[in-house]
Amino acid sequence: MEPRILEVRTKILKKNDELARSMRARFQEIGVFVSNWVSSPGSGKTAFFGGHLT
């Protein structure tokens, strides 16, 4: 069963990578800056954006 689980995960990640590549290219074409912020809950993401974007 292990190889099959790995195969499914690989296919999902590959599709995600293809979609992300396509979206990055599209954003670049139209001149849109995109940033992905990932961190633990309570680390201050919302406070940071609230203080800088309003």
Image (cartoon, helix red, strand yellow):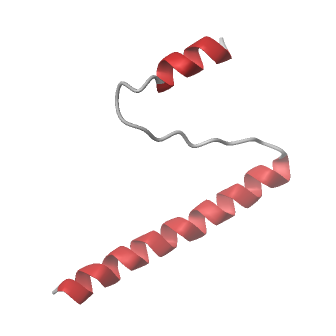
Q: Quadrant of residue 13?
A: bottom left
**x 58%, y 21%: residue:** 49
In the picture, the quarter occupied by the C terminus is top right
Q: Quadrant of residue 1?
A: bottom left
Q: Residue furthest left?
A: 1
8 lies above or below 51: below
- Comparing 15 with 44, the one in front is 44
- Comparing 34 with 43, the one in front is 43
| Residue 18 relative to residue 41: left or right | right
**Residue 12 location, x and y as percent?**
41, 71
**Residue 27 location, x and y as percent?**
75, 50
**Residue 3 location, x and y as percent?**
25, 88
5 lies above or below 51: below
| Residue 33 relative to residue 41: left or right | right
| Residue 42 relative to residue 25: left or right | left
| Residue 16 relative to residue 6: left or right | right
27 lies above or below 35: below
**x 47%, y 41%: residue:** 38
Q: Residue furthest front?
A: 43
**Residue 41 location, x and y as percent?**
34, 30
- Comparing 18 with 2, the one in front is 2
Tag count in the figure?
A: 0
**x 50%, y 71%: residue:** 15
